[in-house]
Image (cartoon, grey):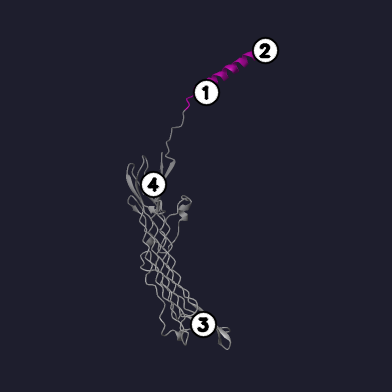
Amino acid sequence: MYRFKKISLISLLIILNSCKKDKEEEKVKVNPPEIHILSNQHSKLFTAQMNADGSFSSYQGEWIVPEHVTSVKVIGCSGGNAGGGGGAGGAGASYYLGSWFGASWGGNATAGGGANGHHSGEPGQLGQLGKYRDENSGWYSAEKTANGYPQSISAKISGTFGTEGEVSTFGPLAFSKASTNTKNSDNTMKIKSKFTDYSVCLGGFGGRGGNGGHGSYFEYPNFLEGQTRYFHGGLGGKGGDGLDGYSSIIEEHTLTVTPGTKFTVYVGVGGKGGIGSKERTPHQGGARVMGSASGDGFPGQDGQNGRPGIIHIEWIGK
């Protein structure tokens, strides 16, 4: 009897457990609703086109706002300004035969070219007068010997100015010209992490001015109580350096947009570097020149072109 009750109890438990499983399986499983999130970040880079000779041509194109996109972040800059060309140096001066061993002045130099809207760069230096010294003395100016001897040839042609970079635009948005960056701040680190392969936004260096010619050199043994006297003709003035071009400021803007809207895109190139003075002033010569010949004045160097602008856009879409 007891054994029968035990078996009946076990059977009842099995039946109840089976019913419980059936009820659990009968429950409706509800999956959460699908939520479509526009979580894919997209980007596009617009750059100026490099030519075979290393120069750049501006980029002109368009971007159409994709479906579901309502805002776009725009990062970029205009082209940098170019540097001015360097001025030419003046010719070196000679010492001449005569009772005072006459020396003339070195030739004057010309100014470097301007940039950033300025009309001129660094001024050229004036030529120097000759000098002399004895073995146990310092140098003396030959100013008393300058009268009557012509100044060495001065340069006449200055370096030309560097032009300003072009403005970059994205639809109605125009990036600032480099000339507004009056402190010439270089903030390219703001984009170098994104565009490591591009050198952009920077202004070009101004061309260096040409060196002035060296003066003639002459030694006169036993000039005074057995001492040798040394003579140097005046140096020509050094040409003025061209001004450096300003870099453009990198700007970041977020624009509200409408899908399907077409934006014109223009990436401006940098300004064109000024031309250095090509003048080479000839040194003084002649039968009465003492010692070595003086030297010619040298031409100035060209200014560098400004670097091109760039535009980078980012948006969230499918």
Looking at the image, tell me whether mark 3 or mark 1 is earlier in sequence order: 1
Instruction: State the extent of the magenta-drawn residues as a range.
Output: 1-29
How crowded is the residue under tag 4: few (<14 C-alpha within 10 Å), some, or many (20+)? some
Residue that appears at 54% across and 19% down: 19
Front tag of 3 and 1: 3
In the picture of the structure, the residue carrying the numbered disc 2 is: 3
- Calculate the distance from the C-alpha at mark 4 to the C-alpha at mark 1: 51 Å
In the picture of the structure, the residue carrying the numbered disc 3 is: 132
How crowded is the residue under tag 1: few (<14 C-alpha within 10 Å), some, or many (20+)? few
Looking at the image, tell me whether mark 4 or mark 3 is earlier in sequence order: 4
Residue 137 visible in this rendered orientation of the protein: no
Secondary-structure class at tag 2: helix
Q: Is residue 141 above or below residue 307?
A: below
- What amino acid is labelled 4 in the image? Val
Secondary-structure class at tag 1: helix
* Quadrant where the C terminus is found in the figure: top left
Residue that appears at 34% across and 47% down: 61
User: Extreme right residue here?
Assistant: 2
Looking at the image, tell me whether mark 2 or mark 4 is earlier in sequence order: 2
Front tag of 2 and 4: 4
**Magenta segment main secondary structure:** helix
Looking at the image, tell me whether mark 4 or mark 1 is earlier in sequence order: 1
Q: Is residue 180 above or below residue 255?
A: below
- What amino acid is labelled 1 in the image? Glu
Viewer-nearest residue: 72 or 17: 72
In the picture of the structure, the residue carrying the numbered disc 1 is: 24
Q: Quadrant of residue 286?
A: bottom left
**Circle number at residue 72:** 4
